[in-house]
Amino acid sequence: MTEPGKVSMEKIVSLCQRRGFIFPSSEIYGGLSSCWDYGPLGVELKRNIKDAWWRAVVQERDDIVGLDAGILMHPQTWAASGHLEGFSDPLVECKNCHLRWRVDDLKDKNCPACGGELTKPRLFNLMFKTFMGPVEEEANVVYLRPETAQGMFVNFQNVVNTTRKRIPFGITQIGKAFRNEITTGNFVFRSREFEQMEIEFFVKPGTDEEWFNYWLEERLNWYVNLGIKKEHLRLRQHAKDELAHYARVCYDIDYLFPMGWAELEGIANRGDFDLVQHTKYSGKSLDYFDDETKERFIPYIIEPSAGVDRSALAFLCDAYDEEPAEDEIRVLLHFHPSLAPIKVAVLPLSRREKLVEAAKQVYADLRQCWIVDYDDAQSIGRRYRRQDEIGTPFCITIDFQSLEDKQVTIRERDTMKQIRVPISELKAALAAKLSGEDLFVLPPGGQIWKE
Ligand code: GAP
């Protein structure tokens, strides 16, 4: 068994590239620094993470609604939000090789690359700049959003007016964000293009502390319910001098990544900072009228802000395991079924025509419900290993006996236990197993086959 929290980043990177979870961006050109492409399995994993978020915060609640605002926003947004002024890192430049360095990353006074003399620190804004329309001039500058949050603040009044949600309520969105990060690395942990899942939860001032504590607990539980081990998560409060310019209080949910404890999600009490700023810059009132108490106020905002890529990395690291199996090592990903990229693999025992026909029928039927793989190459043992390594919870084996008795074998990834079930019961049995039912709860006509 892999010791908890001890899988190396090299092993995760190698598995991700070997099996098609994550590739370096534009790899045939040598890659693009700190940018990544998600392959066939990675895209499924990310979709499942985003679906789990949407399910937990929109589908299963009645106090949060979704939004999908544009990546490009009016440039005044970033003046109001404080990003134009405050979203920067102090950098020094080498007078010899012109590389730039973050001051807090430097161990001595000279350039770490060539030993050259360094300039005085200057602030370097982390937002990506581009131009709107055909003329590249200052008046046409727009930015790629560095967080999805602002789209939700500027649409606060639109959502209140069109949904008639009453406070306390939230808006959530999932989408790309871009930061011209200076210190990158650790695989997808810190990249320049990434995805965020954020909630802006609007509350009455005075109730903000209570809601902040509520969201800390909710968000921790979300990770635990999706399989992350409790001992690999911790809460860390930001010290006064590390708080973002908008935050009154902030906690990170840290995960024990291979390189150590690091931020997985931030939960901030943003107070009324954002709505006050956008009111000031837009001239449009963003206050709220409470029909019951007849009070008018500017809501406070509690913001859980998670990264899809960091979540994917955490789920991969936490799921990774190695077990001795016969004379080799069985590598497996213990993904929660709802996160597993492929839910079921259909494996005919041989390529004989009759068996293939029956297997393809099962495959076609199961694909109506889930992402299913079909694999008939090499020995059944090797095929099981291939599915274990990508975290497929169940394999279905179709053998010659299946042609006689119309039954197939379900084999479970984690325990390697097997049961026989009638093909007519297969879909219902898999649906129950994927939602957490024990493998040995048998459908009508099923039997324990191998332990
Ligand atoms: N709206 C608040 C906000 O953006 P943040 O702490 O800067 O707060 C929130 O970012 C989350 O976004 C982080 O916890 C992390 O999961 C993710 N994130 C931020 N920068 C990232 C980067 N460069 N690469 C990957 N994920 C990043």
Image: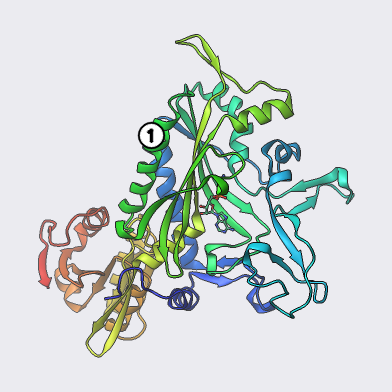
Decide if residue 139 is in sight here: yes
Could you classify mark 1 by the number of other residues whose Cα lies within 10 Å: few (under 14), some (14-19), or many (20 or more)? few
Identify the residue shown where x is 60% and y is 62%.
191
Indicate the quadrant where residue 23 lies. Answer: bottom right
Q: Secondary structure at mark 1?
A: loop
The residue under label 1 is which amino acid type? Arg
Q: Is the N terminus in the top left, top right, bottom left or bottom right quadrant?
A: bottom left
Identify the residue shown where x is 39% and y is 45%.
219
Q: Is the C terminus in the top left, top right, bottom left or bottom right quadrant?
A: bottom left
Side (left or right) of 83 relative to 9: right
Q: Is 192 placed above or below 266 here?
A: below
Indicate the quadrant where residue 30 lies. Answer: bottom right
Near-viewer residue (428 or 256): 256
Residue 12, image x, y percentages: 44, 73
* Residue at the front extreme, as displayed: 109
Side (left or right) of 122 relative to 156: right
Residue topped by disc 1: 61
Residue 52, image x, y percentages: 40, 49
Side (left or right) of 212 relative to 388: right
Near-viewer residue (252 or 424): 252
Q: Is 166 placed above or below 404 here?
A: above
Near-viewer residue (248 or 422): 248
Residue 345, image x, y percentages: 33, 69
Residue 212, image x, y percentages: 42, 36
Decide if residue 229 is in sight here: no
